Image (spheres, rainbow, N blue to C red):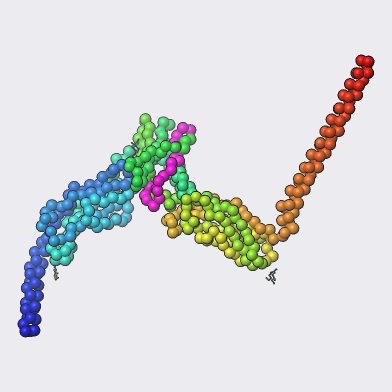
């Protein structure tokens, strides 16, 4: 019986094999069409574009198959295509609108109906670019945006070269969460021209692409718009650390401390750089903590000084801007010199001042007494003459 069973199984196997074999030969001819109506749509978000398409015709024949789309897109001139495989009929991403955009898509069939191997259609292509207006010279120059203390965004720029006197520029911005692009409401001006923008309070704008367009107008020429994309956490410039202190633990060890810059930046997001000076030698070193222990190179060193600056670290952003350096904090080895500097000198000054005031008062009082005496005398003589 066991043998018969085996035989029957074998027969089934052969049958299935031949059945697949036959689909195999027909599979070689499976053809699928590319998606229809592929287009790139600009919703007015200054670089955030929609890529959308419709299913290809005759997909009904492939009901057992997974139908996917392979989408490739890039800014014209850029080296690499971004590749996305999706079952959806749309995709959204940010593009640099200073350049054109190109995209292509094809249908992918996978699964039983294709005998396990992938079948792809030919490509369907689309391009998009904002109608180029004005020559390059009319663009703004040296755009610089800083997100101060993870709180206030300020951008500034220089006027385009060779633009007519009546040219003025406007800034628009958008990020995910805004219904539409907004215009700057607080421009920084120079000679009546907009040369920067102080942004209002922005609601959770970080860790998203932030899109900016600075375009302009003039009666006599067209002005080329400029587009920018960045993430705000990457352009944070913190305020410098404050309240520095030096604690000389013993003849060898020194503890340097400072306060974490106040503001919305999380404490774990900072990296600091310390510039430590021991007499004439200077050491520059980074640290993630707001304190550091340093070994003195000589226990005879007379002056220890340090200053500190801060930046957002790699755990919180891809890049950042160093804060200004803090004020310098020093420790003087010689106690006497310290007392002299910090106590005796001011004391001497104060004493001198008091002495001077007393002298002046005394002098004035004397003069006053003299005057009173004189008038009294005069009065008396006057009275004498009356009687
Ligand atoms: C179909 O599948 C068989 C067995 O799995 C394989 O040998 C054959 O190459 C496949 N045909 C195609 C067109 O992929
Ligand atoms: C500048 O860009 C904004 C936002 O895209 C647009 O509404 C406005 O019409 C543009 N202005 C000019 C002069 O092109
Ligand atoms: C200073 O350092 C020297 C050796 O470098 C050591 O002999 C001496 O004891 C130290 N002085 C103090 C006050 O620790």
Look at 68% across and 58% down and name the residue there.
332
View extreme (top): residue: 386
Residue 88 visible to an observer of this rendering:
yes
* Stretch in magenta: 191-210
Quadrant of the rendered image containing residue 144 = top left
- Assess whether residue 196 is covered by the magenta stretch: yes
- Assess whether residue 176 is covered by the magenta stretch: no
Asked if 359 appears above or below 52 in the picture, the reply is above
Q: Residue 138: x, y in percent?
A: 39, 38
Asked if 283 appears above or below 374 in the picture, the reply is below
Q: Residue 164: x, y in percent?
A: 41, 32
Residue 144 visible to an observer of this rendering:
no
Left or right: where does residue 265 sit relative to residue 341? left
Q: Residue 147: x, y in percent?
A: 46, 47
Most common SS among magenta residues = loop
Picture quarter with ligand 3: bottom right
View extreme (front): residue: 387
Total marks in image? 0
Look at 69% across and 65% down and name the residue there.
300
Quadrant containing the N terminus in the rendered view: bottom left
Left or right: where does residue 85 sit relative to residue 251? left
């Amino acid at each position: 019986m066991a043998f018969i069973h085996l035989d029957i199984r074998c027969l089934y196997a052969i049958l299935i094999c031949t059945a697949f074999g036959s689909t195999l030969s027909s599979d070689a001819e499976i053809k699928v069409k590319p998606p229809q109506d592929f287009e790139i749509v600009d919703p007015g978000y200054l670089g955030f574009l929609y890529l959308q398409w419709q299913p290809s015709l005759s997909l009904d024949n492939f009901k057992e198959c997974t139908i996917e789309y392979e989408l490739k897109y890039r800014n014209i001139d850029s080296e690499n295509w971004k590749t996305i495989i999706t079952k959806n009929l749309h995709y959204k991403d940010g593009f640099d609108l200073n350049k054109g955009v190109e995209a292509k898509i094809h249908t992918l069939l996978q699964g039983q109906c294709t005998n396990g191997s992938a079948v792809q259609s030919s490509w369907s292509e689309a391009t998009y670019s904002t109608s180029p207006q004005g020559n390059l010279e009319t663009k703004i120059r040296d755009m610089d945006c800083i997100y101060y203390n993870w709180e206030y965004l300020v951008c500034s720029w220089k006027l385009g070269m060779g633009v007519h006197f009546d040219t003025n520029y406007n800034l628009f911005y958008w990020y995910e969460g805004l219904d539409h692009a907004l215009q700057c409401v607080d421009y920084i001006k120079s000679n009546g021209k907009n040369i920067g923008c102080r942004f209002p309070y922005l609601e959770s704008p970080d860790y998203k692409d932030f899109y900016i367009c600075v375009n302009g107008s003039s009666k006599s020429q067209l002005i080329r718009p400029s587009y920018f994309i960045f993430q705000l956490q990457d352009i944070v410039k913190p305020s410098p650390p404050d309240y520095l202190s030096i604690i000389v633990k013993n003849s060898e060890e020194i503890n340097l401390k400072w306060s974490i810059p106040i503001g919305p930046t999380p404490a774990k997001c900072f990296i600091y750089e310390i510039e430590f000076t021991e007499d004439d030698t200077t050491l520059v070193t980074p640290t993630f903590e707001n304190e550091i222990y340093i070994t003195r190179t000589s226990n005879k060193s007379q002056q220890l000084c340090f200053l500190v600056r801060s930046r957002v670290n790699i755990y919180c952003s891809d890049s950042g801007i160093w804060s200004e350096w803090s004020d310098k904090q020093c420790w003087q080895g010689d106690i006497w010199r310290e007392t002299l500097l910090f106590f005796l000198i001011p004391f001497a000054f104060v004493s001198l001042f008091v002495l001077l005031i007393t002298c002046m008062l005394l002098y004035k009082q004397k003069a006053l007494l003299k005057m009173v005496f004189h008038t009294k005398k005069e009065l008396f003589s006057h009275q004498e003459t009356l009687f």
